[in-house]
Amino acid sequence: DDEHVVTKTIVGAKNERKVCAVYAGPTSGFEIIHGLVDRIMTLTEVAPEEEYIKNSAKGQEEQYRVAREGWYYTIRELKEENGHPSARTYFPGTSRAAEVMLTKPGEETKSIGTFGILHPEVLSNFDVLY
């Protein structure tokens, strides 16, 4: 949890939850982390956008999803040229990193996180064996 000072609340602060996961193994594990992101969004009752569902084998299952009205997410390729601050964290090249985009009712779509294949320098900085 992160705590932030917010003067508009009764208690003067708010908690913000964050998540971090690493898979280190003989393969990249991109699809494992991608699945984890999808699972987290399911548990927080945020539905995937229609276009995202079309690219999934689980299209039929989506009709049974419990989701908050107007809350949607999608995953798009994270491109370094778009200037995202965490783009250099991941291995350079095409389709090696993704950005999770969230749409809330009455708000513009915004980036809420990233995932991808970590750059070897990042792995060594955190003593993650690969």
Image: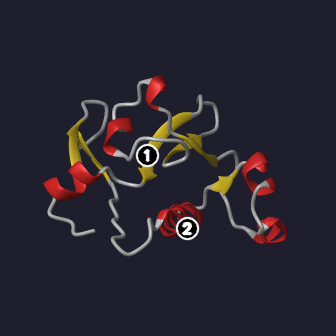
| For residue 50, side relative to residue 124 (left or right) | right
Which quadrant, please, contains the N terminus? bottom left
Q: Which amino acid does label 1 sit on?
A: Gly
Q: Foreground residue, 72 or 60?
A: 60
Q: Foreground residue, 112 or 46?
A: 112
Return the residue at label 2. Answer: 35
**Residue 35 appears at what percent x and percent y?**
55, 67
**Residue 41 appears at what percent x and percent y?**
55, 60
**Residue 102 appears at what percent x and percent y?**
56, 42
| For residue 45, side relative to residue 52 (left or right) | left
Q: Say few, some or many: other residues with alpha carbon within 10 Å of mark 1 (under 14 / 14 to 19 / 20 or more).
A: some
**Residue 46 appears at what percent x and percent y?**
61, 56
Return the residue at label 1. Answer: 113
State the scheme by which the image is colored: secondary structure
Task: Tell me the quarter of the picture where residue 63 sits.
Answer: bottom right
Mark toward the start of the polypeptide (1 vs 2): 2
Mark 1 → mark 2, Cα distance in angstroms = 14 Å
